[in-house]
Every structure is written in C-alpha cells, then in structure tokens.
Amino acid sequence: MSDVRLSIPPTDHGRPFGLGTISIQGLGARLIRAFSWSLIATVFTQGGTFVVNLLLANLWGLELFGRYAIVQSTLASLSALAPPTTGATAIKYTAELRTRDPARAGRILGLCSVVSTIMALASGGGLLLAAAGVATYVLRDPT
C-alpha cells in the first residue's frame, strides 16, 4: 500500500474577521469563517437539489417522479449510516495533530479516505444487488 500524504494548510490565527466596524480575531474569526463557508455550501447543495427535483418532476410526471423520490430517499437514508464514524475520526485527529504531527494527521486522513471509499463501494454493490428486489416488491415494477 502506498504512503498517502496530505498537506494541511497553515492556520490563520492572526487574520482578523471584519464586518463593517466590528473586528473579531483568533478563534472567533475562524469560527465565523467556517460557519460562513458551511452556510454557503448548504445553500448551494440544497438549492441545487431543489432545482433538479423541480425539473425532474415536471419532465417525468407524478408516478415516475414518485418512484425516483422513493429511490432517492432510500439512498439518502442508507448513505447517512456510514460516514459519521470516519468523519468524526478525521475531525478528532486533524484537530489534535495538525500542528504537533502533520504527517501523522495526513496518514490518518488518508486512511479515513480509503475506508470511506471501501464503504461506499460496498454499499453501492449491495444496492446494485438489491435493485431488482426493490423494483419488484417495493415499486411493483418487474422491468
């Protein structure tokens, strides 16, 4: 197995966050920046899903879109089961080791990436194997 190395960007402890006449430094500034990026990502992700669903509902009609919605919600439910463990591990060790031992933090992030990929492939394979049963018994469509 090859040695996976990830580079961790330098921190921005000294860079203040300014909004009008208010200026926040240190951890507060980092927290506000992180929250802002998270909010932007959530808006684009949820907004994109909403727009795609509107388009598909209009193109496919009620029955076909309903089938799609069942499959999509099943996939969303199943995909929510696996990632929290690797995500929590990555967050914990990155926060702990990012300045003290960045090489080890990179190895742990690489391992989390490999484990997540293996879990995704296993889940996808299981869903592929179960697709015919779901179509026949849940959606009542043998084709």
Image: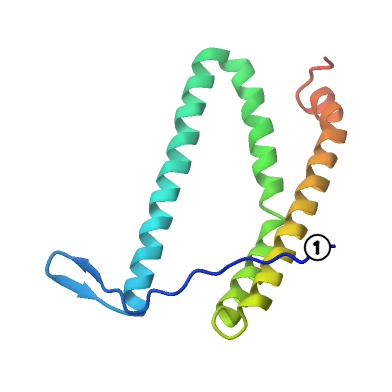
Residue drawn at x 43%, y 75% is 11
20 or 72, which lies in front? 20
Quadrant in the picture for residue 25: bottom left
The type of residue carrying mark 1 is: Ser
At which x and y percent is residue 76? 64, 43
54 or 28, which lies in front? 28
At which x and y percent is residue 5? 68, 67
Compared to residue 79, the image places residue 3 above or below, namely below
Toward the left, the furthest residue is 21
Quadrant in the picture for residue 139: top right
At which x and y percent is residue 112? 71, 64
Q: Secondary structure at mark 1?
A: loop
At which x and y percent is residue 3? 77, 66
109 or 78, which lies in front? 109
Q: Dividing the image into 4 quarters, which one contains the C terminus?
A: top right
To which residue does mark 1 refer?
A: 2
Residue drawn at x 49%, y 15% is 58
